[in-house]
Image (cartoon, rainbow, N blue to C red):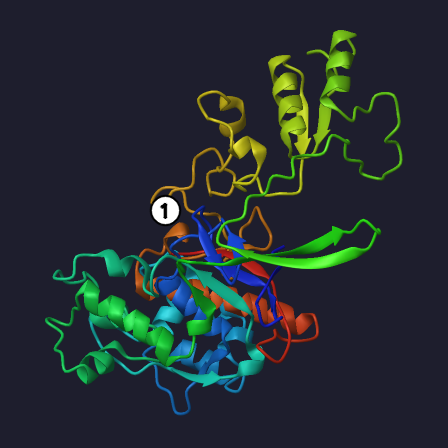
Amino acid sequence: MLNWFLSAGVPLRCMLAYRQEEFNTAGVPHNNTQRRNGPSGICLSYLLSGYTPYLAPGATHPNPLLLRKLEERPDVSLLEQDLEYLSEGLEGRSSNPAAVLFDTLLLPDGDFGQDCASALQWRRERERSVPHLVLGKGPPGGAWHAMEGSMRTVSLANWMELPGLKLKDWVRDKRRNLRNDRATPAEIASYYQHFVSETGLQSNFHGERPGTTWEVRGYQKSREGLELPFAVSAENVVLATGTHDKPARLGVEGEDLPFICHSFWEFEAAIARGQVDQHSDPVLIVGAGLTAADGVLTAHHLNTPVCHAFRRAVTDPALIFNQLPKVLYPEYHKDSGRYLGIDPQQPISCRGNPVDVHPFTYESVQEPGLFAMGPLVGDNFVRFLKGGALGIASTLSKRSSKEGGLSEDSSGQAGSCSSLDT
């Protein structure tokens, strides 16, 4: 589980990022970040910041059955309702039912080019806020800032908008005209950036910040044996503390049994004595460091069955075996990064093998606490990726309620997730 903290002392329980790029903010190093401040990240940040959807008073909708279901609990937010029940019988252009549900509520008859009023009303309920960061390169809007500014979007303009701020109204305020109801990428990027500012989400977004200053604090022992505190500020810090040669212990019963090895040298000695070979029972290797990597590779070369147990996700870039060259260590890479997909034998692909998630929570089937949305789950259009934000925010809201409290904003509580988005 993530255990990052905001500078204000609020526990950070949701980080919208997943890729290795350098990112520094407030003197804290981050090396698992991605350009994830596009519409997916913005929409999810909107819902995690306390903006809550309800059935609008006097709302109408072209689907009378869906409207009737919503009218059964008009005072209960959409986040607290049964999304599976509401999605029953709905059809749309996404394979994710929550995405179809949210789309039909935000854009009734959107497939017919209609600009009907949304059936939802948005309320700012700050007590629902979940502390989070959206990490990315550049300003909010993500890849839209890098696209050619003169071309027009394939999608209609209202398909590109985010909840609570009509794109056409924003364009009109800028005294511009939409050509054939389509906008340029430059207009979309500017709209997304304005959306973050207009809704007060700026503090959740962090991009590249040059000139970061680091502060190192510690204690220096004097000749008299006193520990004197010190603090040093620097633009660059090199960690050169080395590694420790004392084997780690689990502190469990049975660690001193004769068939337990605590170092690679002990394992090699057991092999030399003929105690471990291709006919042996499976060898269990616990840990995810260099010694564990050496042990697994050695057992593999002996054709000895091996089970490898560790506490990280198999795709974690910090794992030793994810840092080994694929050409030299194909044994370690043939399965790494695959098991999250619908087809666990194939690499994750937005087109052919999306992340395998629960259809209404968007939580990974393989990794509890890891969520995915947008193209990673097959929703390549902005109009449908918003459903991922609904599913994730709804899940966190319901879990927080079960735990006895909602998440903190700058004055209050907390929830927990990691999220893959675009």
Q: Secondary structure at mark 1?
A: loop
Q: Position of residue 80 (x, y in %)?
A: 56, 75
Q: Residue at x 51, y 80 (%)?
A: 77
* Quadrant location of the N terminus in the rendered image: bottom right
| Residue at the outermost bottom position | 58
Left or right of residue 368: residue 30: left
* Quadrant location of the C terminus in the rendered image: bottom left
Where is 123 relative to 395, above or below? below
Left or right of residue 8: residue 97: left
Q: Residue at x 63, y 75 (%)?
A: 406
Is residue 333 visible in the rendered structure shown here? yes
The quarter of the displayed image where residue 256 is located: top right
Q: Position of residue 81 (x, y in %)?
A: 54, 74
Is residue 107 visible in the rendered structure shown here? no
Query: Looking at this view, is 135 or 178 the one in front?
Result: 135
| Residue at the outermost top position | 273
Q: How many marks?
A: 1
Q: Position of residue 314 (x, y in %)?
A: 56, 39
Query: Looking at this view, is 117 or 10 the one in front?
Result: 10
Q: Residues within 10 Å of mark 1 (few under 14, many from 20)?
A: some
Q: Residue at x 57, y 37 (%)?
A: 319
Residue annotated with mark 1: 350
Where is 373 relative to 393, above or below? above
Left or right of residue 162: residue 222: right
Check disc 1 and give the amino acid type.
Cys
Q: Position of residue 75 (x, y in %)?
A: 53, 87
Where is 301 relative to 346, above or below? above
| Residue at the outermost front position | 223
Q: Residue at x 55, y 44 (%)?
A: 238
